[in-house]
Amino acid sequence: MLEAGEEGLRERQSRDAETRLAVLARATRAFAEASRSPPHLFDAVVREIAAALNCACSLSLVSDDGAHFTTPYVHATDPEFLAALLAHFAAGDARPLAGHPGLCHVFGNGTPFLLADVAGSLEALGAGASPEVLRFAHGKHVKSSLVVPLNVSGRLIGALALTRHGEHAALLDQHDLAFA
């Protein structure tokens, strides 16, 4: 019985590895095609990550003053959630980092920020999150969030934010952190 369980585990691990390799192959092709144009490259990054991890992915760029950010690149596998994200970031103007705990952490420390269970952490976030962020997270049933630094030539230029939403969404975890 144990051997059957081990065999099943090996098969799942093999499928997971094949899936990751396929994603990396698609991403490599997309990145190669877009490499001459940073906007096309960034758009390819958010699309590939959203598709690979079945989540929403946004790319925020930090301003030169380090106190503001813009989020010009957004994609989600759920069209309704994508529309909500686009509306949320529609202003397009630079926003202050204050009130965005994940981005503040990443831009302040240069390390990833994982909030595996957003609903269980909304009260703790309340002090650092703006009312707009809290409304969006609650209203759109954001379940899990991961923000990772985006470095170019050793310089922090932005962050990738991944979110999953909905009652049945899987939580983001250390495996997603390693992949992102």
Image (cartoon, helix red, strand yellow):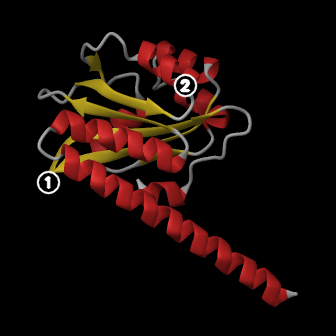
Q: Secondary structure at mark 2?
A: helix
Could you classify mark 2 by the number of other residues whose Cα lies within 10 Å: few (under 14), some (14-19), or many (20 or more)? few
Q: Nearer the viewer, mark 1 or mark 2?
A: 2
Q: Give coordinates of residue 78: x percent, y percent.
A: 57, 30
Q: Which residue is mark 2?
A: 79
Q: How many marks?
A: 2
Q: CA distance from mark 1 to mark 2?
A: 35 Å
* Residue at horizontal 53 percent and vertical 35 percent from the top: 77
- In the figure, 7 relative to 179: above or below? below
Q: Give coordinates of residue 94: x percent, y percent.
A: 24, 17
* Residue at horizontal 25 percent and vertical 50 percent from the top: 31
Point out the image quarter for the N terminus.
bottom right
Q: Quadrant of residue 28?
A: bottom left
Q: Secondary structure at mark 1?
A: loop
Q: Quadrant of residue 156?
A: top left
Q: Which mark is residue 146?
A: none
- In the figure, 36 relative to 27: above or below? above
Left or right, residue 82 beside residue 66: right
Label 2 sits on what residue type? Pro
Near-viewer residue (91 or 46):
46
Near-viewer residue (149 or 109):
149
Q: Give coordinates of residue 50: x percent, y percent.
A: 46, 41
Q: Is residue 21 visible?
A: yes
Label 1 sits on what residue type? Gly
* Residue at horizontal 40 percent and vertical 39 percent from the top: 47
Q: Which residue is mark 1?
A: 154
Q: Assess whether mark 2 and mark 1 are in contact (beta carbons under 8 angstroms).
A: no
- In the figure, 11 relative to 26: above or below? below
Q: Give coordinates of residue 158: x percent, y percent.
A: 25, 38
Q: Is residue 110 visible?
A: no
Could you classify mark 1 by the number of other residues whose Cα lies within 10 Å: few (under 14), some (14-19), or many (20 or more)? few
